Image: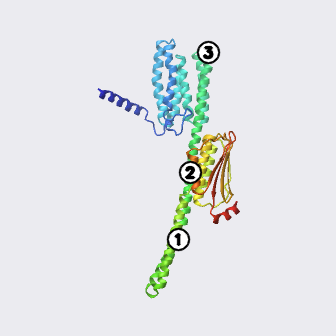
Amino acid sequence: MNTPVRSVRSTIGIMLARLLAAHPTALARCPGRSFTGGTQYWFPLVNLVWLIWLLSSLWLWRLDTRARLLTVASLAVFLVLYRRAWYGPRDRALWNALAIGGLGLTLLPANESAWTYAIYAGAILPFATSARLALRLQAALSAALVLDARFLAHLPWIETASAVVVCGAIFVMNLFSSQERRRQAELRLSQDEIRRLAATAERERIGRDLHDLLGHTLSLIALKSELARRLLEREPGRAGEEVAAIERIAREALAQVRSAVTGMRAAGLAAELASARLMFEAAGIEFRYELPPLALPPEIETAFALGLREAATNVERHAGARQVRFDLRAEAGGLALRLRDDGRGGIQRRGNGLNGMEERLRALGGTLTIHSPPRGGTELCLWLPLPRVRQAATARAA
């Protein structure tokens, strides 16, 4: 009994999968989210609901047989063009969008609701080409729509104006959405490039350090090993001293290698500041900072860098700020990192990110302080103690 039903469902699923199979460069594969909040891949399918305007004309308007047949035929053509525009190759999306607009202008004299196609054409244009060309094409489409509606379809001015306004509004919303998506893509590329350059520089530094460290140490170990071998028969006592020296040098080299590896794993504060600046610029937030030339221990720099990353992400997502300031200075026998914003403030409870930040600081003997009055902005202070051997040099640099 259930086998035919399952077979039908499987067939429908395969047909839908093939129908929605997107080209690797398709507009529907663009990263990010649309202004409606849904994923870009499903955004075109959701918007097909607006075809109800055109479909309702088949029953609500007094259309002759010719107009009905043309409307039904146009729907089939539209679905093919619409699918190609969103799920086909990106370089053909513009031509499919223009074809949809032309389809609406052609059908408008026979069906007054055909300007619905112009809405879809204007919705695709911002994603299919540059903002400047999209604006020009939308202006041309609006002018053609006015001429067609007034002189061929003989629509009243109020209906013509409504069609132009609706098409323009949808176009503007999608234009802002496409620009935001492009900025997000550029931001991701910039952040990836910064991380790549930082990782490359760090690898080169570690490579130089290891080369200098191990080259000298291994040469010294080889010389002392050769000396100990020669003294082994003549002066066993001195040979033992040389072997002990070899062991001491090897242990020191091992500690230095571990320290270098720890530094390689550490997160860089300068790289995080650069990433935060790019993120704030993309969000339209002014970011002021100045990183003093301090030589921080790897564990302290990593804690500050991860704390800055979490704090900057929270500001960009939740604060609604226009300005953010960063400073790092010696304070009370340690270092204090402060991040201030002029956003809405009023932080009532700490989420997982802030709790994890506080636990990371507490493990190093530090503290996290938050001052966030309602509508008064937020100030985060990350304080960490410095080793005594570094405090004097840090105080002089500050």
Mark 1 or 3, closer to the camera: 1
Q: Position of residue 222 (x, y in %)?
A: 48, 76
Chain-order first, disc 1 or disc 3? 3
Can you identify the residue that label 1 sits on? 252
Assign the N terminus to one quadrant of the image: top left
Label 2, secondary structure: give it.
Answer: helix
Mark 1 or 2, closer to the camera: 1
Q: Nearer the viewer, residue 295 or 58?
A: 295
Residue density around tag 2, few if under 14, some if 14–19, many if 20 or more, within 10 Å: few
Mark 3–mark 2 Cα distance, whole angstroms, equals 55 Å
In the rendered image of this protein, does residue 207 appear above or below residue 275?
A: below
Can you identify the residue that label 3 sits on? 156
In the rendered image of this protein, does residue 258 appear above or below residue 380?
A: below
Q: Quadrant of residue 373?
A: top right
Can residue 108 be seen here? The reply is no
Point 49% across, 26% down: residue: 48
Q: Amino acid at mark 2?
A: Glu
Q: Amino acid at mark 1?
A: Glu
Residue lying at the far bottom in this picture: please name it.
234
Chain-order first, disc 3 or disc 2? 3
> Disc 1, disc 2: CB below 8 Å?
no
Q: Amino acid at mark 3?
A: Pro
Can you identify the residue that label 2 sits on? 193
Assign the C terminus to one quadrant of the image: bottom right
Q: Position of residue 298 (x, y in %)?
A: 58, 60
> Disc 3, disc 2: CB below 8 Å?
no
Can residue 251 be seen here? The reply is yes
Label 1, secondary structure: give it.
Answer: helix
Q: Position of residue 282 (x, y in %)?
A: 62, 43
Tell me: 337 left or right of 50: right
Q: Position of residue 190 (x, y in %)?
A: 58, 48
Mark 3 or 2, closer to the camera: 2
